[in-house]
Image: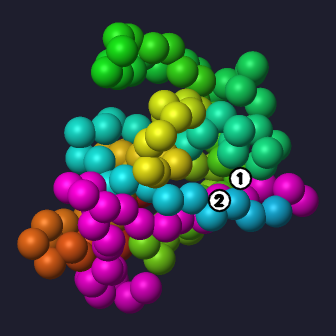
Amino acid sequence: MREGQPYRLAYHGNLLVLRAAAGGGNQGVVVVCLAVDTGASYTTLPVEVVEALGCDTHHPLRTVRIVAANGVIVAPVVALPWFHCLGQRLTNFPVVAHTLPTGTFVDGLLGMDFLRRCGAVIAVGEATLRCHGLIHTP
């Protein structure tokens, strides 16, 4: 995707959703449906997905406390070998490994960690997102 080119999102009810891909070495590629969530600090993928890609959730980079609908949970943060979304491919991208409740339409959440890094500008009425280039953050 060229810088600033609008990326079409889809509405599911009031949620804006998109597809992303993650991969890990010889483990292949997994395509996931994510909700664009400006209220989420971190990008979140199901535990089953990150483990299938070879990430060790029992020895994470760190853990984070997340306020969820049913209280505060502690979840592992793991580095995905690569993550591709909105035309951006990041290697060793840290994501929270947490499976959303059963019945949730999406697999996970595209959080502010990714949206800030790509300089995202969301047009809610048009259901588009422009990524203004990868911003390198520590």
Decide: is 51 above or below 23: above
Q: Residue most toward the front?
A: 103
Circle number at residue 81: 1
Decide: is 71 above or below 115: above
Magenta residue span: 1-27
Decide: is 117 above or below 72: below
Q: Residue at x 65, y 34 (%)?
A: 47
**In the image, residue 71 lies in the stretch drawn in magenta:** no
How many other residues sit within 10 Å of disc 2, few (<14), some (14-19) or many (≥20)?
A: many
Which three-letter amino acid code belongs to the residue tagged 1?
Answer: Pro
- The x and y percentages for residue 107 are 52, 48
Left or right, 109 with respect to 9, comes to right
Left or right, 109 with respect to 98, comes to left
Residue 112 seen from this side: yes
Left or right, 49 with respect to 8, comes to right
Residue 90 seen from this side: no
Q: Secondary structure at mark 1?
A: strand
Circle number at residue 13: none
**In the image, residue 21 lies in the stretch drawn in magenta:** yes
Which three-letter amino acid code belongs to the residue tagged 2?
Answer: Ala
Q: For the residues labelled 1 and 2, say whether their Cβ atoms are less than 8 Å apart.
A: yes
Circle number at residue 22: 2
Q: Secondary structure at mark 2?
A: strand
In the rendered image, the quadrant that contains the N terminus is: bottom left
Q: What's the distance in space between the residues labelled 1 and 2, CA to CA?
A: 8 Å
In the rendered image, the quadrant that contains the C terminus is: top left
